[in-house]
Image (tube, helix red, strand yellow):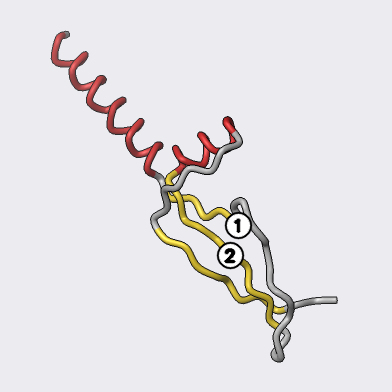
Amino acid sequence: MKHLKVILIVVATALLITFVVWPVKKQCPNGPCTTAPDAQGLVRTYYEVQPLGAVVIEDVTGQHVAVAYSSGYDNKKYRQ
């Protein structure tokens, strides 16, 4: 019975850590969303890939958490 309790604690801890560090792509965090269309008709949209835990903290507190796995711009075709 004691081994089962230890195994359950280890599994629960692993699931919690996985949940907190799961990568989430967030469009336009705290800034301008898109640029004006360029000559090819593309607009650039800024994104950050952040841990899910940071996204939840940002949503709850309304404050930007400066943790990101990566960031960049997506090019999308502009439609009128």
Q: Amino acid at mark 2?
A: Tyr
Identified at 28% across, 33% down, the residue is: 14
Q: Is residue 50 above or below residue 12?
A: below
Instruction: Kindly indicate the quadrant of the structure image that contains residue 58.
Output: top right
Residue 76, given in percent of the width and then of the height, sits at: 66, 75
Nearer-N-terminus badge (1/2): 1
Is residue 69 left or right of 46 when viewed as pictured? left
Helix or strand or loop: what does disc 2 sit on?
A: strand
Identified at 61% across, 76% down, the residue is: 75
| Residue at the extreme right | 80
Residue in the foreground of this view, choosing between 18 and 38: 38
Identified at 40% across, 45% down, the residue is: 22
Q: Amino acid at mark 1?
A: Gln
Residue 43, given in percent of the width and then of the height, sits at: 68, 76
Residue 56, given in percent of the width and then of the height, sits at: 52, 36
Instruction: Kindly indicate the quadrant of the structure image that contains residue 42.
Output: bottom right
Specify the quadrant that holds the N terminus: top left
Give the residue at mark 1: 27
Give the residue at mark 2: 46
